[in-house]
Amino acid sequence: MMLIKKLIIGIASLGLLFGGASNRTVAQMPHQTHNSATSQTSEFQRIEQPLWVKGVVTASGLGLIGLEVWWFLFSKPKSRNAEAHDGIQEVTITVDGGYEPSRVVVNAGKPVRLNFLRRDKSSCLEQVVFPDFHIAQDLGLNQVTPIEFTPQQPGQYTFACGMNMFRGIVEAK
Ligand SMILES: [Cu+2]
């Protein structure tokens, strides 16, 4: 999921880049032919672009901005329901540029086991902290580290990296 996020942001910025580049090319082409024909005119001339070019550039720019705004404001964190095995509710969480899934739904009053698979090399994500359960656990790189606790009351229990930059939520129902 994190990869998809990065990919979309990449494509969006690439789109902006191309939008800008093609806009410049369109602006230069008539400029150069004009210069060779009448060399007397001043170098900085205002070139009127066809209306549809302006329209397309503006529309695609607005579209990309809208996409990014939507992504950051309205896209919900991915949620997963824990699956019970022998009375323990289990979910694997991949740690790679954040937590995936970043929201886990469990039943209150029953033990939970979160298996953290750390793929991210950055020291930022080497520790995961569950303040409500007084857990601060180091995660081995490319290893699965199980963390067990029992949320007695329904509610939202947050977890985060050691520096509280990346966060996730365990929702107990
Ligand atoms: Cu961090």
Image (cartoon, rainbow, N blue to C red):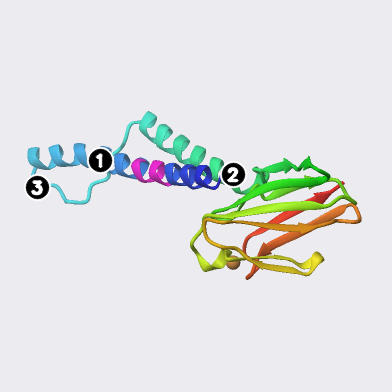
Judging by the rendered image, the residue that carries numbered circle 1 is: 25
Q: Magenta part of the protein: which range?
A: 13-18
CA distance separating discs 1 and 3? 23 Å
Quarter of the N terminus within the rendering = top right
What is the chief secondary structure element of the magenta stretch? helix
Tell me the residue at 43%/46% (across/down): 10
Where residue 86 appears, as percent x and y from the top left, is 81, 43
Amino acid type of disc 1? Answer: Thr
Secondary element at image label 2:
helix
Residue linked to disc 3? 40
First-in-chain label (1 vs 3):
1
Question: Distance between the Cα atoms at labels 1 and 2?
Answer: 30 Å
Q: Secondary structure at mark 1?
A: helix
Q: How many marks?
A: 3
Give x and y (percent) for residue 33.
13, 37
Q: Disc 3 versus disc 2: distance between alpha carbons?
A: 50 Å
Residue type (three-letter) at the residue carrying disc 3 = Gln
Q: Nearer the viewer, residue 25 or 139?
A: 139
Q: Are marks 1 and 2 in contact (CB under 8 Å)?
A: no
User: Quick check: which quadrant has ligand 1?
Assistant: bottom right
Tag of residue 164? none
Say whether disc 3 or disc 2 marks the residue closer to the N-terminus.
3
- Is the Cβ of the residue at disc 1 closer than 8 Å to that at disc 3? no
Whether 14 is among the magenta residues is yes
Query: Pointer 2: what residue?
Result: 71
Please tell me in which quadrant of the rendered image residue 87 appears: top right
